[in-house]
Image: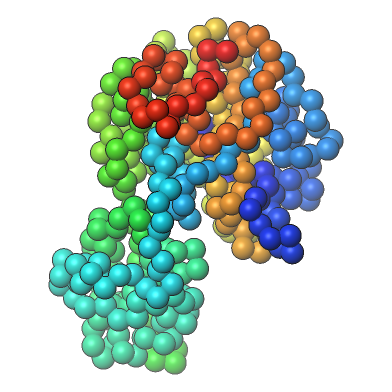
């Protein structure tokens, strides 16, 4: 279970910048009831002093990403065994000219803008020119996301969505961009307003990952948005879930089956509430997850291993709440663990490497070898 938005403390920050700890900062404001996550070691690794002794039979620690991407999809890729450590293209001055020309040719339109700016500023600055020329506005926001804006009197929403889907299909790993957002707006110069019908088109990774080797050896199921994002990975079964509630229901059904294989389930509500700065919803959602974990631990048998990990912190009460430089928790439960193990800090790909070792898959590069965590 990969929980987006569950961070446990920033790293690599200058001393003068206050660190974000998504979990701890929320727990200070609303004391959450998390008996299962607490017993698995979450509060200890999040430096919460009120709870510092996990129960026996758990393996726990912190995960620190190795990839250079700024967005969630790059972290998913690392979980699945592709660590992009090469330099990312600096997009402070917009997307590269060769990329711009390529998407303009595919779209059949030229773009204006191609700068780093805020949403309202992009529309105010280029809206008049857009109306006069019919050219959509392309710009990047501070989180390195790509946006295409158009007045619905000039370009229909449906056409704008089509444009963004084409742009997203041409993204490359070294851009560090994980989505293209269609931003329709209305009004006239001086009186422009953004509409609510924005739509996101996610970058779908095409790169090879270690999970493909795992899927050749055992059955692998991808639940939730993971099933759509990693459509190219062969031999995996996919179940698309529109909501976290459906994802947990599907996961529950799998636990009731006699299933032999590996299931990856991504949860996104916590991240969504963090982005919305909704403290209460964030806290309640984590309590729901904790309750589900409690039911799950009652169901698993002697051969099951249950992992709960975070992905990319997102604190609802901190300015600049989306942090790509926050540790995330690694929590593992198995009925026949012999002792509690504190792993300290390991990389995101630790899990996939452990699964490969568990299934006796050794033919991956020596520099990706990691001590395994499953058969201990």
Q: Quadrant of residue 240?
A: top left
Q: Compared to 289, does 16 lie above or below? A: below
| 277 left or right, relative to 233 | right
363 relative position to 7: left or right = left
Picture quadrant where residue 157 is located: bottom left
Residue 317, image x, y percentages:
69, 58
Residue 132 is left or right of residue 60, and the answer is: left
Q: In the rendered view, would you say 374 is above or below 132?
A: above
- Residue shown at 33%/22% (left/top)? 363
Query: Quick check: 88 above or below 129?
Result: above
Q: Which residue is most to the right?
A: 50
Residue located at (44% from left, 92% from top): 190
Position of the C terminus by quadrant = top right
Q: Residue at x 34, y 52 (%)?
A: 173
Question: What is the x, y in percent for residue 340?
Answer: 69, 18
Q: Is residue 54 visible?
A: yes
Q: Is residue 195 visible?
A: no
Please name the residue shown 50% across and 9% down the image: 303
Q: Front-most of 127 and 207?
A: 207
């Amino acid at each position: 279970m990969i929980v987006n938005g569950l961070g446990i403390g920033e790293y690599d920050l200058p001393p003068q910048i206050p660190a974000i700890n998504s979990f701890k900062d929320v727990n200070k404001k609303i004391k959450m009831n998390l008996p299962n996550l607490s017993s698995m070691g979450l509060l200890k690794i999040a430096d919460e002093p009120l709870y510092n002794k996990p129960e026996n039979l758990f393996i726990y620690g912190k995960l620190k990403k190795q990839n250079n991407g700024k967005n969630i999809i790059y972290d998913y890729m690392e979980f699945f065994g592709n660590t992009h450590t090469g330099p990312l293209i600096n997009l402070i001055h917009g997307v590269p000219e060769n990329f711009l020309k390529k998407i303009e040719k595919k779209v059949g339109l030229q773009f204006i803008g191609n700068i780093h700016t805020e949403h309202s500023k992009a529309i105010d600055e280029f809206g008049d020119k857009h109306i006069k020329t019919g050219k959509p506005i392309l710009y990047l926001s501070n989180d390195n996301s790509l946006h295409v804006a158009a007045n619905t009197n000039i370009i229909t929403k449906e056409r704008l969505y089509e444009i963004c889907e084409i742009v997203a299909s041409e993204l490359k790993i070294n851009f560090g961009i994980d989505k293209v957002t269609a931003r329709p707006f209305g009004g006239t110069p001086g009186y422009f307003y953004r509409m609510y019908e924005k739509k996101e088109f996610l970058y779908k990774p095409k790169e090879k990952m270690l999970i493909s080797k795992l899927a050749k050896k055992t059955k692998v199921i991808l639940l939730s948005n993971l099933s759509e994002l990693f459509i190219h990975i062969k031999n995996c079964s996919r179940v698309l879930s529109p909501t976290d509630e459906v994802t947990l229901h599907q996961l529950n059904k799998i636990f009731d089956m006699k299933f032999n294989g590996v299931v990856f389930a991504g949860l996104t509500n916590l991240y969504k509430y963090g982005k919305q700065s909704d403290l209460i919803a964030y806290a309640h959602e984590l309590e729901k997850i904790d309750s589900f974990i409690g039911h799950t631990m009652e169901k698993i048998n002697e051969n099951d291993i249950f992992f709960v990990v975070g992905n990319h912190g997102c604190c609802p009460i901190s300015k600049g709440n989306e942090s790509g430089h926050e540790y995330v928790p690694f929590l593992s439960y198995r009925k026949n663990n012999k002792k509690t193990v504190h792993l300290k800090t390991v990389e995101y790909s630790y899990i996939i490497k452990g699964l490969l070792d568990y299934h006796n898959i050794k033919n991956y590069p020596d520099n990706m070898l990691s001590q395994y965590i499953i058969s201990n």
